[in-house]
Amino acid sequence: MKKYYKVFISTISIIFILSVLYYIIFPSKGEYNSDSADTILWAKASIDAGGLFNENFEYAALFTFGGQLLMIPFIKLFGYGITANICGMVVFYLLFLTALFFIFKKMDFSLTWNLFSLAVVMMLISLSVKMREIFWQHIIYYSLGMLFLYVGICLVDASAKEIHKNLVKYDYKQMDGSTLAKKIKNRVREIVLLLFTFVWFMLCSTNQTVTFAMLVVPLLGALIGLIVLNPLTPKVYADNKLEKKHFDSIIVKLISVVTLASLLGYRFGTFLKRNVSSSYQNGYSKMSLPETWPDHLKSFFPALLDMMGIGYLDDVQLMSAKGVIALYKVVCAILLILIPFLAIISWKKIKSIKFRFMILIHFILCTIIMLGFVCGFLSAANWRISPVYVSCIVTSLLYVKWLFKDIKTKNLSVLICIGMFALAAISFVGICKLKPDYGKDKFAMKMVDYLEENGYTDGYATFWNSALITLLSNGKIRLRNIAIDGADMRLYHYQQESNWFKDEELEKNTFILTTADEYTNLVLDGCEVANYASNFIVNDDFVIMEYTFNPASVMK
């Protein structure tokens, strides 16, 4: 590749990568919703309790080793709010980016190839509003699981290298001082790396089911698969500078470390979670009825398209700009699914054990997610296949790079790269269209301004407004959850601490915020709680009911 091509590709790639940072820091807040606040809510709950979990908090999900740990320092520094959340997400983005950088580096990618691959992954992850929410607004199962996986792969690879160095036999009688020192240094490095690997897998496994599904089982399955499912030929061993007995020893040692660490972590996680539970997390972990499985399977491809930003296109002309882009995304989606299968077809030609390892991890991970999607309730939400989408992108890039090495397939590799870069450019343009103050005219943003200007601080609102407004106001406005069902208005403890509803501030002047539609339904159904209000602020978009006491006392 000519030097100016490398400079051009690297420069554009860096711009693409930095555009995600721009999104996280500036326009992302305009796309936030109340779900985006969950990670920082868990962090606040931990701070309030002075421990890992808060027994008075109703969690949507339980992570003993999760993103809330990144948020805690920033809450202590800036207070609860959007500033702390954005800082935490910037750190997560940098961690995710670094993990991927080392994944590609260990696959012998040059700096140009590495930057190109990072740009493609980051841009394709940012292709839709939902994917941007999942990865860049909060830290949840899917993004966290992929980070765990890629860091785990890097640690296992580094450990394998050090184990291999120490399998070489030395004649200690003929060994000079420098050789002995080198041998000792290699042994220490092996122990340290295996210790890091052990600690990482143990900590990750405290999250239990999520970690086992997205890290432990795929990685262990791939290690076993390298030996059992696809025995390596003598030539492959030679190409990787290995002996079979050494290879088997490396695999056995890694399997032992990962298995022991994961089992200990799982047990430790059970101990840490003994006094808390998650109704939402437990709800989608169940099996669905077998008669629903065909429908779940049929919904997979539309779900994938949704992750790529193809929404409702009923009124879109086929040959319009939007229509052409949608068709192009469909073609790319098909290719992202098919390319990893081409890697399987090319298995015997692939001499790199690392690449074979990554292929096995991809298919085991996808199988686990698809089983949950088809046979469970993961299909209830499209974004739950996001790990499959990300893994398809990474595995496709690895295969395209492998094609590039062969003169016979180099042109095909370049063609696919151009296609991927074009899709990344579409995502980049979409991000650039989002101004730094994007979303300022949305309901939540306008309500933050109105409530702050008029001195409102403590009150209630339905879930989709309460958590979001509290977050966007940097905690200056503190809204608690209520649920409205016909005439029934009740406290809603989901993602809330029970003590928040008993705050002394609520005994003074407080309020209930509703949208105009919510208030209309309350009036029509004859809501009793509304009758206790001392004053009403009625607007075209919202209604504020003011109280001189805590209205929680008259809610069910």
Image: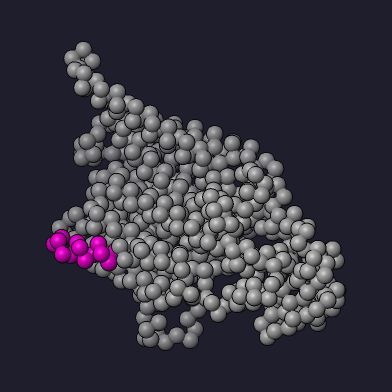
Q: Relative to 542, say whether 268 is above or below.
A: above
Where's the C terminus, which quadrant? bottom right
9 in the magenta segment = yes
Residue 15 drawn at (x, y percent): 31, 66
Closest to the observer, 444 or 109: 444
Quarter holding residue 275: top right
Q: Relative to 265, say whether 27 is above or below.
A: below
Q: Is residue 23 left or right of residue 112?
A: right
Q: Relative to 76, say whether 393 is above or below.
A: below
Where's the N terminus, which quadrant? bottom left
Please tell me which residue is depicted at 29% across the width and 31% down the height of the picture. 164
Residue 466 drawn at (x, y percent): 66, 67
Residue 78 drawn at (x, y percent): 55, 57
Closest to the observer, 529 or 309: 529
The structure's colour scheme is one colour
Work out whether residue 453 can be spotted.
Answer: yes
Please tell me which residue is depicted at 81% across the width and 82% down the height of the picture. 524
Q: Which residues are magenta?
A: 1-13
Work out whether residue 517 can be spotted.
Answer: no
Residue 87 drawn at (x, y percent): 48, 58
Q: Is residue 505 left or right of residue 272?
A: right
| Most common secondary structure along the magenta stretch | helix
Quarter holding residue 476: bottom right
12 in the magenta segment = yes
Please tell me which residue is depicted at 58% across the width and 57% down the height of the picture. 79
Q: Is residue 494 left or right of residue 140?
A: right
Q: Relative to 83, say whether 312 is above or below.
A: below
